[in-house]
Image (tube, coloured by chain):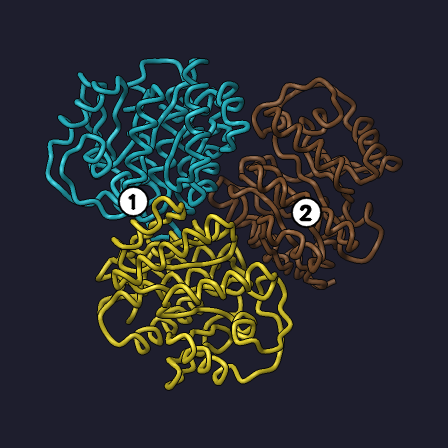
Chain colours: A brown, B yellow, C cyan
Amino acid sequence: MSLQAIYKKQPLVHCITNYVVANFTANGLLAIGASPVMADAVEEAADMAKVSDALLINIGTLRPHTVEAMVRAGQSANAHHVPVVLDPVGVGATAYRLETVRDLLAQIQFQAIRCNAGELAMIANVPWQAKGVDSGSGDMDIAAVAQDVAKKYECLVIVTGEVDVVTDGVQVAHISGGAEMITRVTGSGCLLSAICAATLSVPGEPLSNIVATLQDYKHVAALADATHGTFQHNFFNALQQQAEVLV
Amino acid sequence: MSLQAIYKKQPLVHCITNYVVANFTANGLLAIGASPVMADAVEEAADMAKVSDALLINIGTLRPHTVEAMVRAGQSANAHHVPVVLDPVGVGATAYRLETVRDLLAQIQFQAIRCNAGELAMIANVPWQAKGVDSGSGDMDIAAVAQDVAKKYECLVIVTGEVDVVTDGVQVAHISGGAEMITRVTGSGCLLSAICAATLSVPGEPLSNIVATLQDYKHVAALADATHGTFQHNFFNALQQQAEVLV
Amino acid sequence: MSLQAIYKKQPLVHCITNYVVANFTANGLLAIGASPVMADAVEEAADMAKVSDALLINIGTLRPHTVEAMVRAGQSANAHHVPVVLDPVGVGATAYRLETVRDLLAQIQFQAIRCNAGELAMIANVPWQAKGVDSGSGDMDIAAVAQDVAKKYECLVIVTGEVDVVTDGVQVAHISGGAEMITRVTGSGCLLSAICAATLSVPGEPLSNIVATLQDYKHVAALADATHGTFQHNFFNALQQQAEVLV
C-alpha cells in the first residue's frame, strides 16, 4: 500500500538524475501522483532541495558540475531534514564513478542507498565482475554485505534483483516476485530509487514502508509483463492503478 | 485546424529545451509533421536559430552555458524575424530561474510566453504558492494579469490550465475542454510551447492561430484520455490524426 | 539474422549520444539483448570505451566537453580494438557540427559512418540542401559518393533512406523495404547507428553483417507500421521478437 501513501501525499521529489532516464522517472512519479522536479545546476540545486519532500541523487551520467550540484543539494537536504536516496549507477564501471560515490557518501548523510548486487559489491569493496551499468556476476552473501554497508553509512540499503534485499543493518527483509522483463527497460531501477525517495517522505516506519514499496513495484512489474513495447505501455498503467486503488 | 497548417508547412523548429522532455517534444513535433532540431551549444545556437522557422526557449533544466546559448539563439532569431516562444518552466521554484527569466525577457523580444498560472504570477510579481514545476495554487484574475504581462513584454501570453487563457494585451480568449490526465504526462506543457512556436511560423493572424492550436491540443488530449501508459500511446496517435485530417 | 547474433552475444555498447534519443537508444539496445552504457564525461569516457564491445559517437546535441570525451573514448577504443561508429547528426546544419565531424574523422579511426544522404553530402563536400537534422534534398549518386568517403576514411559507409546503401569502398549493397513512418520517430536513425556498432562486435564479415542488420531493421519497421503512438509501441515489440526468434 506504499504507492497509495505516495499518491495521497503527492510529494515533491527533487531528482538529480541522468538524462537517459529523466523522462521515464518523471512519468513514473507522475503516474503514482508524486510531483517530480529535475534541477541539476549548481546555481539552484540547494534551493530546490530545501523546498522538496525528498531528494534523489543518481550518478548515471556524471559530469563534474553535476557532482558539485549533488553535493550542494544533498547538504541542503540534510540541513532541512529532507530524505536523500543515492543510486550509484554503474559505480563499478569506471574509477571516476567510484571516486564520486565515495565523495558523496563522505559529504552527504543518505537515508537510503538503492543499488544492484554489483554496485553493492563495489561500495563494500567485495570482488565482483561488473558489466557497464548492469549488475554483472559474482558470489557474496548479499544480505550480510548490505548489513555492513547499512551500518557503516547509517542508512537503509536496498539491493534489487530477482530477490530484493533491504536492511537497516539489523533487520533484513527479502522480497520476491516481479518480472525479469523489467530489467530490459532502461530506468526501471532508477525510477525505483526515485520512488524510494518519495516513500521516505511519507509517514510511518521507513524500513517497512520501503518493503511495501518494493512489493508494490514487483507487483506492478508482474502485471505489466509482456514484450518490450507492451511492457512499457502496461507498466505506466499498472503504476497508476496500483497507486490509485481504493484502500 | 492549426495542427493541419503546421503539417502543411512542415516548419523547422529549433528547440532549446530541457533533457526531461526533449524526446517527447521531438516526437510530438514529428507526429504533426514539423521538423524538430535540438541545439543548445553556445557554439551553434545562433546559427541554428537563423535557419529555423521558429525557436522555442524552455528553461526546464537550466545550466549557465545553456542560458548563454538561449540569449544568442534568441537574438539571432530576432535579427532574422524568426518567432520565439518562452516557456518559463518552474520560474517560481528558485531564485536562479527567476533571474534567468528576467534576463531572457530583457534581452530577447519574444512573440509569445506559454506558461501555467503559477509561472505567470511569478513573472508578474503577484503572490502565489508554487510547487516545483507544477502550477501550485493562489488567487488572481489570470486574464487581467496575463494582459498586463502581454502589454509589458509586447507579446502573446498563453496561460494553460483547466481553462486556457490567451491574450495579446487587448483581446482575451478562453479555451476549455481537454483531459486532466494530460497534466500527469511530463512534457505535455513543454510540447505545447513548441507547437505554439511552430504555429507562429504559419501564415495568418497569430492570436487566432494560437487559439486554434490550443483548441486542437485540448481536443487531442480528450481523444487520448486513459490511464497513464495508454494515454501516452493514444496521444501521439491523436496528434498525428488531428494534423493529417483532411480539411 | 544479425539481431539474433547481437542477442546471442549481449555486447556492452558504450554510447556517447544526444539527450534527445538516449532513452530510445538504450531501450532499443535492451530490446535486442545488448547492454547499453551511456558515459560522456571527459573523466571516464576512455575508461568506459576500453571495457566495452563497441562504441557509438553521435553528435546530435554537441557540447565542447562532450567533443573532448568523444575524442578520448574514440582513441581508447582504437587502442583496444573496440569498433567505433560515427553518427554525424545534422552535420550540415551548422559550422560547429561540420568542424567537429572533421576533427573526429581526423583523430579517430571509425569502422563505420552511419548517416543520411544530406549528411553524406556534407562530409563529401557535395552540394546539398540540408534541413536541420533531416536529410533535406539534392541530387547526387549516393553509392558513388559513399564509396569515395569509405575509401577516404577506410571504413564502412552506411547511408539510410528509402533505399539504404552500404559500402566498404569497393562492394556496394542496396537494401529496400521498411516503412516511411520510421522517419517520424525521433532517434530511429540514432538507434540504428548504435545497433550497427553492436553488429560490428559480433563474429563474421562486417559488411555482410551490416547488410543483415539493415534488412532486419527495415523488417522491424515494416512490422511496426502504424500511426505514431502505436508505431513506437509495436517497434520495441518487433525489435525484441526479431532478435529472439529461433534460428
Circle 2 residue:
A72
Tell us which disc is closer to us: 1 or 2.
2
Q: Chain of mark 1?
A: C
Q: Residue at x 65, y 44 (%)?
A: A70
Q: Nearer the viewer, residue C64 or C29?
A: C64
- Residue at 77%, 37% in the rendered image: A157
Tell which subunit mark 2 falls on. A
Q: Percent from the top left, x then y, of residue A11?
A: 69, 60
Question: Is C126 located above or below residue A55 in the figure?
Answer: above
Closer to the camera in the image, A47 or B114 = A47
Which secondary structure, mark 1? loop
- Asked whether the viewer can see residue B108, the reply is yes
Circle 1 sits on which residue? C133
Q: CA distance from mark 1 to mark 2?
A: 37 Å
Specify the quadrant of the image occupied by residue A57: top right
Left-right relation of B239 to A30:
left
Kind of residue at disc 1: Val
Residue B218 in the image, given as x and y percentages of width and height: 42, 71
Instruction: Give the residue drawn at x 31%, y 38%.
Output: C97
Q: Secondary structure at mark 2?
A: helix
